[in-house]
């Protein structure tokens, strides 16, 4: 095995994806997908990375580059003993029929995440030194091998402000590098989370509605990408009702524990919006297409027991003993060997990642349009004028 890894390291210097000549590409696809210019910039940016991203990531960059420039792999498979070329071929071939546009987008996303993490000042932020969120609406703690990210806006049912999305992204990035074994997302007070703060839509920038929708879609994509890529066991401790995006991203968690007081509600049609958090892909996979449609098209609210029966929730606990039982269990799990848990998660999740990134890009692109629609504007205006509640 080490022969393959050593050879790959040398291969990446000797024949990096960057040295494959760029082909003139025809740019098409929805506005949200990366343009040829974005792709070329990302290709140049890779050369400026301060840290070696490692063989696994280099292989992924190679595969995405080939898919983006040449399309699906249709060259003959190298022989068994040609380790290096066979490994490269396998990586490219694993992308299947992913479109050139989606591969280009995934390449751009990956490079942007690599650039961001190579710029982060401290690779291992212990809990005490962790950069704290910008506002009190998010509280991040690390104890007993568990990093807990707590939504802390109980008076507003933990609705997510724009600042909170940014703070959660930063908290997940820090948690992915800290010493904890498990990361938990939970809420303060009687709600888990009432979804996107609808007043986010009232802060119109100078560019108006169009600019607001563009930047919200970019933020949504970055936010969901962090959940797709999170490398350690990620657990949702659902302490009360959950709405909107706090429900849809549950499909990206490894385990979901819920109090029997919780409910799960995705009222997208009521709001003139459409699904996000990769739920258009994960929900049908988890619960079957017709149950998913009832939730995502008709906004059917599930009880905790129903969500558990449909596979969205792992286990439901009586509210009176919820916190005690769940935390005792998580403390025991956090003592398991962390590397084994990471590697097992990788095996379970990795083959889905490219697909999830493509779904996330598409959902964000569709929502960008929805947020500018009359249906959506009217629904939000109605909530803000207190005419409508879920
Ligand atoms: C950039 C990424 C964008 C990602 C997009 C995601 C899409 C979604 O998440 S869609 C889901 C959006 N959420 C909602 O539609 C929920 C709206 N809230 C309600 O319907 C109700 O507040 C409730 C059913 C959640 C709770 O009702 P309840 O009677 O128990 O409490 P309230 O008095 O209504 O709420 C207390 C307080 O909190 C404010 N609030 C609650 N949720 C939100 C919210 N999502 N956005 C803004 N504000 C919210 C509510 O207005 C009250 O505030 P005041 O005390 O100041 O009146």
Image (cartoon, helix red, strand yellow):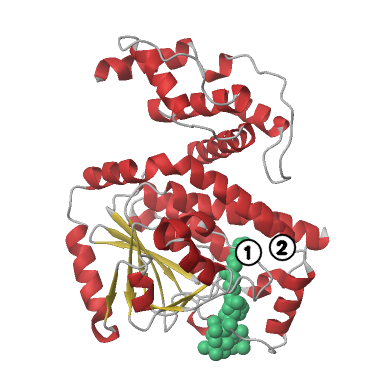
Residue reaching furthest to the front: 290
Residue 378 to residue 281: above or below: below
Please tell me which of labels 1 and 2 falls first in the chain: 1
Q: Residue at x 40, y 55 (%)?
A: 130
Q: Do the residues labelled 1 and 2 touch (CB within 8 Å)?
A: yes
Depth order, front residue of 306/209:
306
Residue 328 to residue 15: above or below: below
Residue 274's tag is: 1
Which quarter of the rendering shows the N terminus?
top left
Residue 366's tag is: none
Residue annotated with mark 2: 370
210 left or right, relative to 388 = right
Depth order, front residue of 321/24:
24
Which quarter of the rendering shows the C terminus?
bottom right
Look at the numbered disc 2 and give the secondary structure of its residue.
helix
366 left or right, relative to 318 = right
Q: Where is residue 173 in the image (x, y as percent from the top left)?
A: 44, 50
């Amino acid at each position: 095995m080490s022969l393959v890894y050593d050879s790959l390291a040398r291969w990446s210097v000797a024949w990096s994806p960057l040295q494959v000549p760029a082909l003139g590409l025809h740019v098409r696809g929805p506005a949200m997908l990366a343009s040829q210019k974005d792709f070329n910039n990302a290709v140049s940016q890779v050369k400026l990375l301060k840290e070696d991203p490692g063989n696994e990531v280099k292989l992924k960059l190679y595969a995405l580059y080939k898919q983006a420039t040449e399309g699906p792999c249709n060259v003959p498979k190298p022989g068994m003993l040609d380790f290096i070329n066979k490994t490269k071929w396998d990586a490219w071939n694993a992308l299947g029929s992913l479109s050139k546009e989606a591969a280009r987008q995934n390449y751009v996303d990956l490079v942007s995440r690599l650039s961001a993490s190579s710029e982060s000042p401290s690779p291992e932020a212990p809990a005490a030194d962790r950069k704290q969120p910008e506002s009190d609406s998010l509280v991040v703690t690390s104890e007993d091998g568990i990093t807990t990210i707590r939504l802390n806006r109980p008076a507003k049912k933990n609705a997510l402000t724009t600042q909170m999305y940014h703070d959660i992204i930063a908290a997940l990035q820090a948690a992915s590098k800290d010493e904890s074994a498990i990361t938990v997302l939970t809420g303060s007070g009687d709600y888990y989370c009432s979804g996107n703060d609808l007043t986010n839509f009232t802060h119109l920038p100078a560019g108006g509605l169009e600019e607001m929708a563009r930047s919200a879609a970019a933020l949504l994509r970055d936010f969901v990408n962090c959940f797709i890529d999170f490398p350690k066991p990620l657990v949702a401790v659902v302490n009360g009702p959950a709405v909107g995006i706090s429900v849809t991203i549950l499909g990206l968690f490894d385990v979901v524990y819920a109090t029997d007081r919780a409910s799960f509600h995705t009222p997208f049609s009521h709001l003139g919006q459409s699904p996000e958090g990769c739920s258009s892909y994960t929900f049908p996979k988890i619960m079957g297409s017709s149950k998913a449609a009832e939730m995502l098209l008709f906004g059917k609210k599930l009880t905790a027991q129903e969500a558990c029966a449909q596979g969205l929730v792992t286990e439901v606990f009586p509210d009176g003993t919820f916190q005690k039982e769940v935390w005792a269990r998580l403390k025991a799990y956090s003592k398991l060997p962390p590397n084994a848990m990471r590697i097992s998660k990788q095996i379970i999740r990795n083959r889905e990642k490219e697909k999830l990134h493509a779904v996330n890009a598409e959902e964000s692109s569709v929502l960008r349009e929805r947020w500018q629609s009359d249906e959506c504007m009217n629904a939000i205006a109605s909530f803000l004028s207190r005419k409508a509640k879920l």
